[in-house]
Amino acid sequence: MKRSLCLFLLALATPPLQAQAPGKALVTREQYSACLDNADEARARQAALQKRKSDYDAASRQLQADLKAHLEARDSVKPGTRLADAWNATSLQLNARSGALNDQAGGIEKDIAEHNRLTDEARSRCSGLQVSTEDRAAVEAKRQKP
């Protein structure tokens, strides 16, 4: 019932941009700013995914506890009684919760895969970029303004 879900989030850890190396062109302020924006977006996506995963894990643990209690009560239920009808209704509710959690896990897995894809793309575009000291200072000063 509980679907195992591994959270593999790739952090967008672009190395510090280097001073200009011989033969390597500097990036523009716009390119540098876009890479910083991509890193900010990746961190926000990662935090949201981690929150969803944490909520999923808590709901899954609660479902497991509810299922365990429900199954433990089975022996005390006599067929054909109102208690049996209630027990059966609870079984249906627990099965529905399990199905909903499985669907949620699938959605989280898809979103993690998309996050990883976007992070890899940004990393390939932005890692190893070189920016001038002046451009770096200008972009970072602009990002500090509200």
Image (cartoon, rainbow, N blue to C red):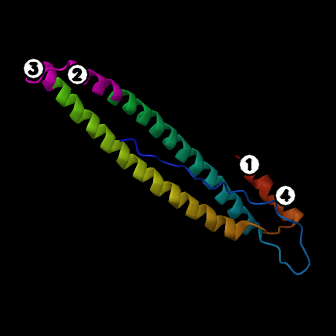
Secondary structure mostly seen in the magenta stretch: helix
Name which of mark 2 and mark 4 comes first in the sequence: 2
The reply to whether discs 4 and 3 touch (Cβ–Cβ < 8 Å) is no
Q: Which mark is residue 145?
A: 1
Q: Residues within 10 Å of mark 1 (few under 14, many from 20)?
A: few
The reply to whether discs 1 and 2 touch (Cβ–Cβ < 8 Å) is no
Q: Is residue 136 left or right of residue 12?
A: right
Read off the residue under disc 4: 137
The quarter of the picture where the N terminus appears is top left
Q: Which mark is residue 78?
A: none
Tell me residue 38's x, y (percent): 65, 59
Distance Cα–Cα, label 3 vs label 2: 13 Å
User: Would you place residue 33 above or below residue 40 in this image?
Assistant: below
Residue 84 sits inside the magenta stretch: yes
Circle 3 SS class: loop
- What stretch of residues is rendered in magenta? 68-85
The kind of residue tagged 2 is Asp
Name which of mark 4 and mark 3 comes first in the sequence: 3
**Quadrant of residue 15 within the rendered picture:** bottom right
Name which of mark 1 and mark 4 comes first in the sequence: 4
Circle 2 SS class: helix
Tell me residue 82's x, y (percent): 11, 20
Name which of mark 3 and mark 1 comes first in the sequence: 3
In depth, the one of 33 and 9 nearer the eye is 9
Read off the residue under disc 3: 81
Read off the residue under disc 2: 75
